[in-house]
Image (tube, rainbow, N blue to C red):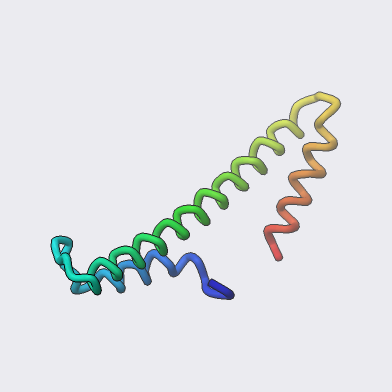
Amino acid sequence: MGDRDTRMLLAEAMQILKGTDADDSRVKARERRAHARVLAMINFADETARLSNEQRIANLLMLAQMDHEDSAWALDEARSMLHQKKR
């Protein structure tokens, strides 16, 4: 995909499907549906990864608030992940 913004993949998939009937069995229509499905799957994978990363940061911050020996490590790890996210 190169430098393509993955947030736009779902919109691109919808654009590809525009004007294609769901019951159209022509090869070109099947190719368009497959192309749109792959773009949507890439978008879903990107969103899932983003949410997983955000959940990890939230869990680390929660652990950092607890009075345990892992608190300092958790805070450092959360800060590191947030710093990487800003790039």
Q: Position of residue 84 (x, y in %)?
A: 73, 58
12 and 65: which is toward the camera = 12
Which residue does the image show at 82% across and 30% down from the upper left? 70
In the image, is 56 to the left or to the right of 46?
right
Which residue does the image show at 68% across and 58% down from the upper left? 85
Which residue does the image show at 80% across and 24% down from the upper left? 67
Q: Quadrant of the C terminus?
A: bottom right
Residue 6 versus residue 56 in the image, above or below = below
57 and 34: which is toward the camera = 34
Q: Name, please, the residue furthest toward the front.
A: 27
In the image, is 85 to the left or to the right of 19?
right
Which residue does the image show at 39% across and 60% down from the upper left? 40
Q: Position of residue 68 (x, y in %)?
A: 81, 24
Residue 19 versus residue 55 in the image, above or below = below
In the image, is 54 to the left or to the right of 48?
right
83 and 37: which is toward the camera = 37
Q: Position of residue 75 (x, y in %)?
A: 79, 40
Q: Position of residue 62 (x, y in %)?
A: 68, 33
